[in-house]
Image: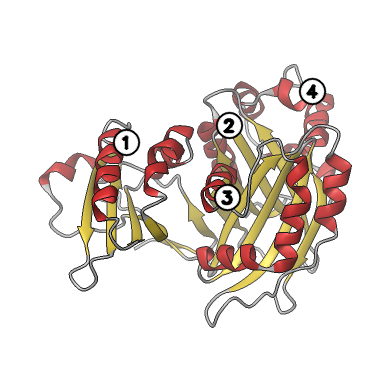
């Protein structure tokens, strides 16, 4: 079995994906749930990349249900689950479900696979490599605020009191980093243990709720945090999943600076752009690279790359942007919405590459670690 010690997460390894959704229903909501599931099942069956799904009910507790689905790979599932179509498709389930938990797994090995899955299996000798993680789950949220309110929102976000790091015996908050690019806010979190438990913990903290209420008047998308459906839809749309994470095998420098780089993709090119950046970051072990660690987040055509570096990005803008190698600048130019970021023209000059780095580098608001991280 091939194991790499430096990649802890990737949606681009080519393996099939198993999605597991655990649900706890309200009493008496079973028929309503079944009707909602039938609607969802019919919708998802036509999604490219979907192979199959199963609905299961607990034999011990009838209010507990399980939905599993199989996909050809992670990218088509992520494109579906992050779409507006998905938000509307699952909305009828909200009033039926007390609690949910979603888990996503790459299928690495299989015994006696069903004949229907034969065409989705890796060829002999091409088994997907296992990855060694660091015990940390990574997730981000992104949303926009009304133009003109950026400085006020930055002031509010910079002034919040950090919530208690310890969530439970197995889960703790490790790091929260906040950035802005124009009127777009990105909040990235690192969690040891159960990500969903940590997100619920954070949302219940008075200091966090106070900040969320304070920025409500400035949001472009209205929300009511006292209404569970409104809050659920907002945070579903704001979710910015981590699709790739890599850390160099080189010794960690004594001091690392964290940057967030914003790459708005041309319409429909978000996943391809995220894949491009992920493949570029595979070269993180290059001793000349300024990047020690990188995490790529993507939703629709929003791509954000979080990088940890021991030196200033502008000392090597080509490597910092992920453009090392022949033809890479042209490939990024093909995928990037340059007009949206204020950089138009070919990325074939040092001037334009430096301008892109300057425009992509997001404004840091806060970067907080828990006391013992």
- Residue at 31% over, 55% down: 107
Dot 2 or dot 4: first in sequence order is 2
The picture places residue 243, in percent across and down from the top left corner, at: 52, 48
Q: Mark 3 or 2 closer to N-term? A: 3
| Identity of the residue drawn at 30% across and 33% down | 43
> How many other residues sit within 10 Å of disc 1, few (<14), some (14-19) or many (≥20)?
some
Residue beneath label 1, please? 49
In the rendered image, residue 368, in percent from the top left (x then y), is placed at 77, 65
Instruction: Give the mark, 1 or 2, whose residue is nearer the N terminus.
Output: 1
Label 3 and label 4: CA atoms lie apart by: 45 Å
Mark identifier at residue 231: 3
Q: Quadrant of the C terminus?
A: bottom right
With respect to residue 187, does 146 lie above or below?
above
Q: Which residue is mark 2?
A: 301
Tell us which disc is closer to us: 3 or 2.
3
Marks 1,2: beta carbons within 8 A: no
Residue highlighted by disc 4: 349
Q: Quadrant of the N terminus?
A: bottom left
Q: Earlier in the sequence, mark 1 or mark 3?
A: 1
Pick the front one: 348 or 300: 300
Q: Is residue 120 left or right of residue 356?
A: left
């Amino acid at each position: 079995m091939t194991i790499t010690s430096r990649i802890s997460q990737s949606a681009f390894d080519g393996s099939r994906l198993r999605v597991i959704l655990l649900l706890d229903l309200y009493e008496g909501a079973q028929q309503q749930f079944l009707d909602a599931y039938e609607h969802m099942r019919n919708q998802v069956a036509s999604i490219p990349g979907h192979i199959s799904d199963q609905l299961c009910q607990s034999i011990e507790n009838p209010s507990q249900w399980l939905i599993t689905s199989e996909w050809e790979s992670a990218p088509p599932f992520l494109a579906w689950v992050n779409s507006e179509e998905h938000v509307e498709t699952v909305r009828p389930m909200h009033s039926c479900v007390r609690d949910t938990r979603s888990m996503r797994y790459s299928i690495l090995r299989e015994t006696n696979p069903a004949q229907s899955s034969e065409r989705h299996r890796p060829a002999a000798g091409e088994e997907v490599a296992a990855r060694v993680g660091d015990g940390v789950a990574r997730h981000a949220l992104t949303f926009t605020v009304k133009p003109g309110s950026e400085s006020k929102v930055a002031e509010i976000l910079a002034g919040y009191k950090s919530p208690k790091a310890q969530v439970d015996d197995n889960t703790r908050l490790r790091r929260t980093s906040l950035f802005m690019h124009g009127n777009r806010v990105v909040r990235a979190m690192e969690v040891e243990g159960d990500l969903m438990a940590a997100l619920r913990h954070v949302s219940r903290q008075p200091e966090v709720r106070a900040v969320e209420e304070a920025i409500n008047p400035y949001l472009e998308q209205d929300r009511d945090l006292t209404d569970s459906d409104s809050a659920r839809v907002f945070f579903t749309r704001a979710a910015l999943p981590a699709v790739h994470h890599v850390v160099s095998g080189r010794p960690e420098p004594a001091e690392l600076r964290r940057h967030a780089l914003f790459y708005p993709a041309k319409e429909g090119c978000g996943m391809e752009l995220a894949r491009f950046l992920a493949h570029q970051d595979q070269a993180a072990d290059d001793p000349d690279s300024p990047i020690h660690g990188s995490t790529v987040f993507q939703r629709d055509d929003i791509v954000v790359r979080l990088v940890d570096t021991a030196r200033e990005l502008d000392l090597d803008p080509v490597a910092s942007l992920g453009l090392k190698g022949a033809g890479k600048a042209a490939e990024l130019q093909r995928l990037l919405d340059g007009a949206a970021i204020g950089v138009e023209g070919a990325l074939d000059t040092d001037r334009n590459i430096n301008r892109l780095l300057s425009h992509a580098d997001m404004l840091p608001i806060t970067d907080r670690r828990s006391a013992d991280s």
